[in-house]
Image: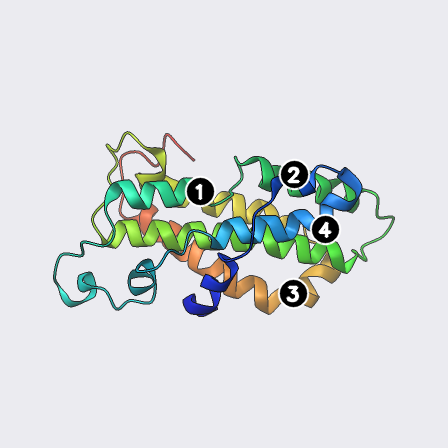
Amino acid sequence: MPPRILQKFSQLSLQDDIFEDETEGNNLSVLNLMAKTFDCLEGDLVYCWDGSCDIQHGRKCHKLSSERILGLLRRVPGPDHQDWLRLAKFREKKLAQKKDSSADSDENERGDVLLTCLWVLNRLWHLALIHGHVSPDSPSRELRPSFSVWLASEALAVVKSFTINGLELHGEGLVCVTDPIRRRAMLTVSAGSKDVPHSI
């Protein structure tokens, strides 16, 4: 999805108080999760996102400091975020109630949302990497090489939760979202970063 389209999501009003009702909130929480996910795309970050910032031309980029990218990584709802966990648990409960392999399309869509959050986190982490902010000695886990491996393991867990029918219906989309996460994790492991074996 083009970054300028993603920016439109950041203009959504985030009103957490409307998601308190558990019954109605499950569908609304999907929108809330997506809005919070794409809220990270601030102004000039788009230049880094679409590969047109100075770093792509061999010059130092002043748009993305380590403090800024760390803040963005922590703003996007991931597997340790309340909104992400709420949706994941609700989806797991609904899938467990199915008596056969035919998953409700809503649960497939919720799975897509969870994976999209991980995809955005992976993109942000990659930006941190190419801007020189990732190090195995970083005090922040989000800026260590092992973070990409963690994202891949979480993405795999979500993919495994899809039913056979769900995989058949969403196979191509799942590959598009998860393959960049997989490739980045494999490159991290092959690089032999010292923090990876202790974090998988």
Is 133 above or below relative to 137?
below
Query: What x and y, as percent, mark residue 18?
Result: 68, 42
Q: Residue at x 52, y 59 (%)?
A: 9
Marks 2/1: CA–CA distance: 18 Å
Q: State which tag comes first along the sequence, 4 or 3.
A: 4
Marks 2 and 3 sit apart, C-alpha to C-alpha, by 32 Å
Q: Nearer the viewer, mark 3 or mark 1?
A: 1
Quarter of the image for residue 71 reads: top left
Q: Indicate the amino acid at tag 2.
A: Asp
Q: Position of residue 40 (x, y in %)?
A: 42, 51
Q: Of label 2 and label 3, which has the lower sequence position?
A: 2
Q: Is residue 46 left or right of residue 76?
A: left
Residue 109 visible in rendering: yes
Instruction: Determine whether the residue tagged by mark 4 lies in a helix, strand or loop.
Output: helix
Q: Which residue matches tag 4?
A: 27
Of the numbered discs 2 and 1, the one sitting upstream in the chain is 2
Amino acid at the residue labelled 3:
His
